[in-house]
Image: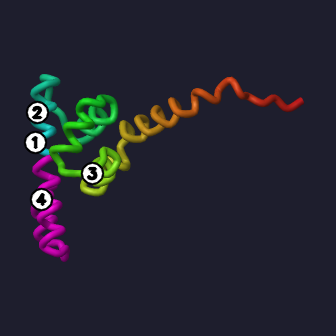
Amino acid sequence: MDLYSDLENSNAAPYDQMINEEFIEGMLKAGSLISIIENKKINTTTLFSLLVENPSYQQFFTEITSCSSFKEALKYMLYMNPSLVKSKITKSLVRKNNGKSKSANKHRKTYIQ
């Protein structure tokens, strides 16, 4: 899948195409640097999981993609890579993160007699 060819074929305004291209370039640069740091080859799914799990990568990724927040950067990444939405790894990360926020309420179990 070539993201650049998809952009050229879209009916998006030139400004939107430029923003999309900048995001893609930032994502590729971030992926390359993280690949070097981790000393392994990574794909978009692995990049997504490393970003979610490592706060220092989050800040770097947000800055290099010129997004206002990490949440916005992740949403944009999911929009640009629809296969991430269907990925089992992505789904398990979301469940894991949702479980962490609910773990504080585990002691509040209610028993019905």
- In the rendered image, the vertical position of residue 54 relative to residue 86, given as above or below: above
- In the rendered image, the vertical position of residue 9 relative to residue 107, given as above or below: below
Query: First in sequence: mark 2 or mark 3?
Result: 2
Q: Is residue 13 magenta?
A: yes
The secondary structure type at the circle numbered 4 is helix
As measured in the structure, the alpha-carbon distance from the residue carrying label 4 to the one carrying label 3 is 17 Å
**Is residue 72 left or right of 57 when viewed as pictured?**
right
Q: Give the range drawn in magenta.
A: 1-26
Indicate the amino acid at tag 1: Lys
The secondary structure type at the circle numbered 2 is helix
**Front-most of residues 40 and 31:** 31
* Residue located beneath label 3 in the image: 68
Q: How many labels does the image show?
A: 4
Say few, some or many: other residues with alpha carbon within 10 Å of mark 4 (under 14 / 14 to 19 / 20 or more).
some
Query: First in sequence: mark 4 or mark 2?
Result: 4
Label 1 near label 4: C-beta < 8 Å?
no
The x, y position of residue 34, in whole percent, is: 15, 31
The x, y position of residue 90, in whole percent, is: 37, 40
Label 3 near label 2: C-beta < 8 Å?
no
The secondary structure type at the circle numbered 3 is loop
* Residue located beneath label 2 in the image: 33
* Residue located beneath label 1 in the image: 29
As measured in the structure, the alpha-carbon distance from the residue carrying label 3 to the one carrying label 1 is 18 Å
Image depth: mark 3 or mark 1 in front: 3
Query: What residue sits 30% from the left and 47% below the top?
Result: 69
As measured in the structure, the alpha-carbon distance from the residue carrying label 1 to the one carrying label 2 is 6 Å
Report the residue that reaches farthest toward the right.
113
* Residue located beneath label 4 in the image: 21
Label 2 near label 1: C-beta < 8 Å?
yes
